[in-house]
């Protein structure tokens, strides 16, 4: 038995130290194919969680935020262009997307423990959740808004007086970012009594 | 008793031959809903468009609540927040370049002055409304008093 083991070890050490050239290429080819399959599979899986259908497969999302969002401009409008949940809530570029996806594991825990599984619980926690999202957008200069709304291509003559006034000053100077004014444009607001800029 | 029954029967029988107006009939009157019978739904009016944004609209009579010269889609006024006051409050009007809310709106119905907007004046759109590109429903030759003529 010991003899067989030694043979086994030496045989494999020899194979690894002096591999037949064919075997080397076969291993490389397998690795290449496996890489494509796994990486592609990972990305496909990641993209599957980046769809609205996935988001509203949980009743917490479908019955609260999605329902509220259906009445707003980003869901129904004259031209039929739509933003879906991940367009605003998941970064587009890879690095930030992965960071956000890892953070989202906390949301899975919330789902499992029923953190907001009733409307009452959702309302009770709305402020905390909204503030977290506002803070995220303040810190990244409303990056997800700007995926579609690019300041450089805004035509102020097409905007209303109020909008053009604010956009050409505070937004231009960078002293304020989209979310500073545009809160509650897609979902109901929490209690705003102590939020900056609100009465 | 027999006589009474006969009268009732007679009424019912003759009733069928008289052309009494039905309940749904408008009686030839044209109202805001047109001349559509009351038991059918008239065609909906075309949707009116609220202009996006323009300068303040002058008042037409004394004590007229100023009308809203901009769109208010999605502006919520409820227990949690007051979108109008995020620009029109005394705290925010300067920065927003908006008209500030009248001091009279700090009074209760009994004339007591409060430190903030009175709850009885909380719902702005009970008096202040947006304007649309609609034709007047009835003809009017109303003229403002001289002091307000512009």
Image: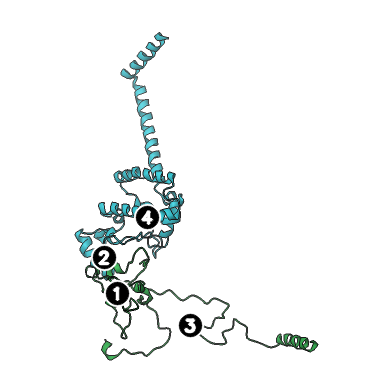
Chain colours: A cyan, B green
Q: Looking at this view, name the residue that lies furthest to the left.
A: A173
Q: Is residue B26 left or right of residue B14?
A: left
Which badge, 2 or 4, comes first in the chain's sequence?
Answer: 4
Q: Are marks 2 and 3 in contact (CB under 8 Å)?
A: no
Q: Are marks 3 and 1 in contact (CB under 8 Å)?
A: no
Looking at the picture, do discs 1 and 4 lie on one chain?
A: no
Query: Pointer 4: what residue?
Result: A126
What label does residue B106 carry, if any? 1
Q: Residue at x 25, y 67 (%)?
A: A164
Looking at the picture, do discs 3 and 4 lie on one chain?
A: no
Looking at the picture, do discs 1 and 2 lie on one chain?
A: no
Q: Chain of mark 4?
A: A
Q: Can residue B95 be seen here?
A: yes
Spatial separation of the CA atoms under disc 2 and disc 3: 41 Å
Residue A53 vertical placement versus A35 (above, below): below
Instruction: Find residue B17 and report its horizontal and vertical position in percent.
Output: 71, 87
Spatial separation of the CA atoms under disc 1 and disc 2: 40 Å
Instruction: Find residue A52 and report its horizontal and vertical position in percent.
Output: 42, 52
Spatial separation of the CA atoms under disc 3 and disc 4: 44 Å
Q: Residue at x 27, y 91 (%)?
A: B146
**Of marks 2 and 4, the one in the foreground:** 4
Query: Pointer 2: what residue?
Result: A155
Q: Residues within 10 Å of mark 4 (few under 14, many from 20)?
A: some
Q: Quadrant of residue B147?
A: bottom left
**Of marks 3 and 4, the one in the foreground:** 4
Instruction: Find residue A89 and report its horizontal and vertical position in percent.
Output: 35, 52
Q: Residues within 10 Å of mark 1 (few under 14, many from 20)?
A: many
What label does residue B32 carry, if any? 3
Which badge, 3 or 1, comes first in the chain's sequence?
Answer: 3
Q: Residues within 10 Å of mark 2 (few under 14, many from 20)?
A: few
| Labels in figure, total | 4
């Amino acid at each position: 038995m010991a003899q067989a083991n030694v043979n086994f070890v030496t045989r494999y050490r020899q194979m690894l130290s002096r591999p037949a050239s064919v075997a080397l290429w076969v291993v490389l080819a397998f690795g290449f194919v496996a890489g494509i399959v796994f990486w592609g599979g990972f990305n496909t899986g990641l993209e599957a969680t980046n769809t609205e259908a996935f988001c509203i497969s949980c009743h917490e999302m479908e019955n609260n935020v999605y329902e509220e969002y259906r009445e707003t401009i980003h869901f129904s409008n004259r031209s039929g262009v739509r933003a879906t949940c991940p367009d605003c809530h998941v970064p587009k570029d890879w690095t930030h997307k992965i960071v956000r996806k890892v953070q989202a594991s906390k949301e899975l825990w919330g789902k499992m423990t029923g953190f907001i599984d009733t409307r009452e619980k959702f309302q009770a926690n709305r402020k905390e959740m909204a503030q977290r999202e506002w803070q995220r957008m303040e810190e990244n200069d409303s990056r997800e808004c700007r995926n579609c709304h690019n300041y450089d291509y805004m035509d102020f003559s097409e905007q209303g007086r109020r909008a053009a006034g604010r956009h050409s000053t505070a937004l231009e100077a960078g002293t304020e970012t989209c979310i500073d004014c545009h809160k509650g444009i897609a979902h109901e607001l929490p209690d705003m009594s102590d939020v900056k800029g609100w009465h | 008793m027999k006589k009474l029954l006969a009268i009732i029967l007679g009424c019912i029988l003759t009733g069928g031959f008289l052309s009494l107006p039905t309940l749904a009939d408008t009686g030839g009157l044209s109202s805001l809903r047109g001349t559509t019978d009351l038991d059918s739904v008239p065609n909906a009016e075309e949707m009116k468009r609220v202009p996006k944004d323009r300068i303040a609209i002058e008042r037409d009579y004394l004590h007229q609540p100023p009308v809203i010269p901009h769109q208010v889609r999605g502006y919520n006024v409820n227990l949690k927040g007051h979108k109008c006051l995020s620009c029109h409050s005394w705290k925010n009007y300067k920065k927003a370049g908006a008209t500030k809310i009248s001091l009279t709106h700090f009074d209760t119905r009994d004339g007591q002055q409060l430190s903030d907007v009175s709850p009885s004046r909380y719902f702005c759109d009970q008096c202040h409304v947006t304007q649309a590109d609609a034709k007047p429903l009835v003809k009017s030759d109303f003229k403002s008093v001289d002091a307000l003529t512009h």
